Amino acid sequence: MLVQLELSSWLVIITLILFLSFWIGFLADAVMERLSFGIFGNMVVITAGAFSGIFVLDYCLTHYILPQRFSNPYMWFLAAVTAGTFALLGTTALKSATR
């Protein structure tokens, strides 16, 4: 499904994810203070997690692991937000466990 997207759709997706991950990284830096990776570090972790979530959902849809009814915009947004959040929380937990 992601293979069929045009360049303009990819630019919108990338811009939206980078914009939201910057602001969420900013808020996470303010909340977590010493445990966070800084604003841009949080942004990188959230962006990597969000794109991982999108690609995992795409893999599950194209290989018929999930039914096609899950292919609506809300599921794509939910996959990106959930994966980005778990990536940030997971790396933060790993960082705090190694200190």
Image (spheres, grey):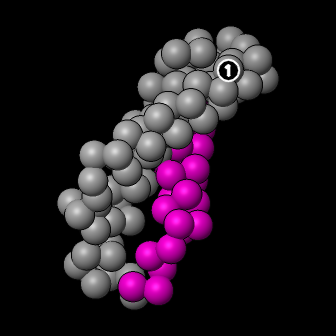
Residue 68 drawn above or below residue 31:
below
Q: Where, by quadrant of the figure, is residue 93 drawn?
A: top right
* Location of the C terminus (image quadrant): top right
Could you tell me the amino acid type at mark 1?
Phe
Spot occupied by residue 38 in the image (x, y as percentages of width and height) = 59, 12
* Apparent side of residue 25 relative to residue 57 in the rendered image (left or right): right
Spot occupied by residue 13 in the image (x, y as percentages of width and height) = 44, 45
Residue 2 drawn above or below residue 28:
below
Q: Residue at x 68, y 12 (%)?
A: 34
Task: Answer whether residue 90 is visible to the viewer in this image.
Answer: no
Residue 92 drawn above or below residue 35:
below
Spot occupied by residue 62 in the image (x, y as percentages of width and height) = 25, 75
Task: Answer whether residue 81 is visible to the viewer in this image.
Answer: yes
Q: Residue at x 47, y 35 (%)?
A: 15
The residue where tag 1 is placed is 26
Is 94 in the magenta? no
* Apparent side of residue 95 relative to residue 58 in the rendered image (left or right): right
Is 71 in the magenta? yes
* Location of the N terminus (image quadrant): bottom left
Magenta span: 68-92
Q: Residue at x 52, y 15 (%)?
A: 40
51, 36: nearer the viewer: 51
